[in-house]
Amino acid sequence: MWSYIPPVRDMLFVIEELLKVRDDWTQIPRFAELDAETAPQILNEAGKFAVQNLAPINAPGDSQGCRYDEGSVTTPDGFAAAYQRYCSAGWPALACDPAEGGHGMPQILNAALYEMLFATNHGWSMYPALAHGAYECLRTHAPEHIKTVYLQKIVSGEWLTTMCLTEPQAGSDVGLVRTRAEPQLDGSYAVTGSKIFISGGDHDLTSNIVHLVLARLPDAPIGSKGISLFVVPKYVPEAQDFSRNAVHCDGIEKKMGIKGSATCVMNFNGARGWIIGEPHRGLAAMFVMMNSARLSVGLQGLGHAEMAYQNGCRYAAERPQMRAVLKPATTESSSRGGADPIAFQPAIRKILLTLRAFVEGERAMGYWCAHLLDIAEHHPDAARRTEAQDQVSLLTPIVKSFFTENGFVLSSAALQVWGGYGYIHEYGIEQSLRDSRIAMIYEGTNEIQAIDLLVRKVIGDGGKRFRTLLKTILGEATLCAATPGCEQLGDALKLVHDRLLLATGALIGGSAENPEHAYRVATDYLRLSGLTVIGSLWARAARIAGPRTSDAFYRTKMETAQFYFDYIFPETQLRIELINKRKCALPWVEAG
């Protein structure tokens, strides 16, 4: 009942027509030789892998869950075999440097791969999802002897990785971390402490697990500035006998969703580790991994929304229930008492169109962010690299928070299409709803993302980077307003751009006088930013599709763009009003 068709046609529209990434690839030596067949081939093969290997074990993995026995975790049936096929096909190496055994493909293709993996099996995809971020972290900050031992094993998928930050008393506030690291005579460190909520902390997919652990050196100052980063393997490759390290899983959590992913309690009892980056600068090194993970988590929300949309459309087309008020003239009522498919009902159509507008808009935004990562790392022009990195720093918290909130909200909206059947496990949507909820919490809660965007990045630099993003949006609004058939969309986008610019200036100007205000409206500001960026991408899509509406694909694009501006984009006015309520205050809530 729950199935998936890889949306390759829309992915290629975003990559080749909306973003025109090939224009940038020709300027980047690493990608200059990629031909027009590369993206379609990779996307088609990735879609086949996801459909054939991951979709069939998604629901069974949810029902079976992981098993814990005396310190060891066994993943659901089929997970280990699927992972071996994943590695054999070379997927872990897709976007890694050829110097470390990678295929050197662009990040935008890796993003498309992971959208399909998350859509078909979120629980399984949690295991490899952190590997690329760990690879980037070690490649950027690790000493050469660590790179030599670990990088190729991670690139090949032979070893998987974890990110060990959270402790019982230290969630969003990592400055409260208590795990200790004592220097040893051989240059290693003895790491001691307990970490919780560690995804993939133990499993049966690989022969070794590489933990990246935040801990404190003996001379560490208090707070986040006293944290260092260490690589702590389950088995020590530096030892001649590849001996077991003093790191153990002490249990797994029973969770609301992603039950095929082992969420572990990990204890480090003087485990051997090696420092990554500079002492007391662990967060700076870890942020390389965390930023990669936040884009990945955003794609989880997109994957769930895509699945909810596809399956909701399929069910709505098959489920006859009462006569429709209006319906296409070419259709006939069902033989079941003259009933029509619920897809004809306005309430259901509105749900499904909302899903489609967000899914396709988010795909464009998420892939744009991934493409900017390629420019930031590989473009020969230093100015282009800097500008791209500035834009990534703004888009990443929006992608993480906006996509994951929508992933849950849209899955819930889609469940309504099934009615009572949606509440039943066998129909699939209730699992998607449960699985999607965690993405709003981990890798930095959505509230933390909003504060990061507004307080640290927008107000933090006086709006410099954000004004560059707004300039891009204004440019799209101007082009759209001058395009026949798109004028209304361009005018609406320009109006919101102008109001967002004014609101941003007021927030920056008033931050000293009323410092709490920015924290109070940060979630509204991030939501407004997400709606506006996606609005600019829908405006661009409308410009492309407008002259080609004789083709059903482009006609649907144009209709969806119009729907977005008619029914979704007006939410921007509400968010602007909430942001501008500077004289309002939140009352205190008494504890207990």
Image (cartoon, helix red, strand yellow):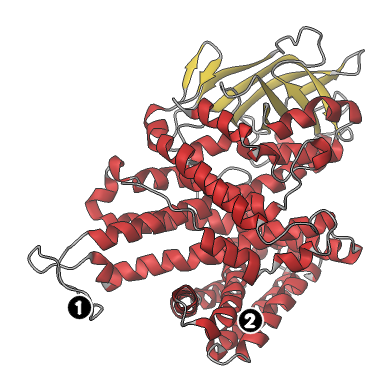
> What kind of residue is marked 2?
Arg
- Judged from the image, the secondary structure of the residue bearing numbered disc 2 is helix
Please provide percent x and percent y for residue 297: 59, 48
Instruction: Report crowding for label 1: few under 14, some 14 to 19, many 20 or more residues within 10 A (C-alpha).
Output: few
Residue positioned 66% across, 83% down in the render? 498
User: In the displayed structure, does residue 113 sit left or right of residue 254?
Assistant: right
**Mark 1 vs mark 2: in front:** 1
Residue positioned 45% across, 80% down in the render? 566
Residue bearing mark 2: 499
Please provide percent x and percent y for residue 126: 56, 37
Residue positioned 41% across, 43% down in the render? 434
In this view, the residue in front, 496 or 294, is 294
Please provide percent x and percent y for residue 588: 54, 55
User: In the displayed structure, does residue 87 sit left or right of residue 575?
Assistant: right
From this view, report whether residue 385 is shown above or below residue 307. Answer: below
Residue bearing mark 1: 325
Work out which residue is located at the far top of the displayed protein and give it. 241
In this view, the residue in front, 179 or 201, is 201
Work out which residue is located at the far left of the displayed protein and give it. 337
> What kind of residue is marked 1?
Val
| Quadrant in which residue 474 is drawn | bottom right
From this view, report whether residue 578 is shown above or below residue 231. Answer: below
From this view, report whether residue 493 is shown above or below residue 131. Answer: below
Residue 224 visible to an observer of this rendering: no
Residue 117 visible to an observer of this rendering: yes
Instruction: Report crowding for label 2: few under 14, some 14 to 19, many 20 or more residues within 10 A (C-alpha).
Output: some
Q: Which mark is residue 225?
A: none
Q: How many marks?
A: 2
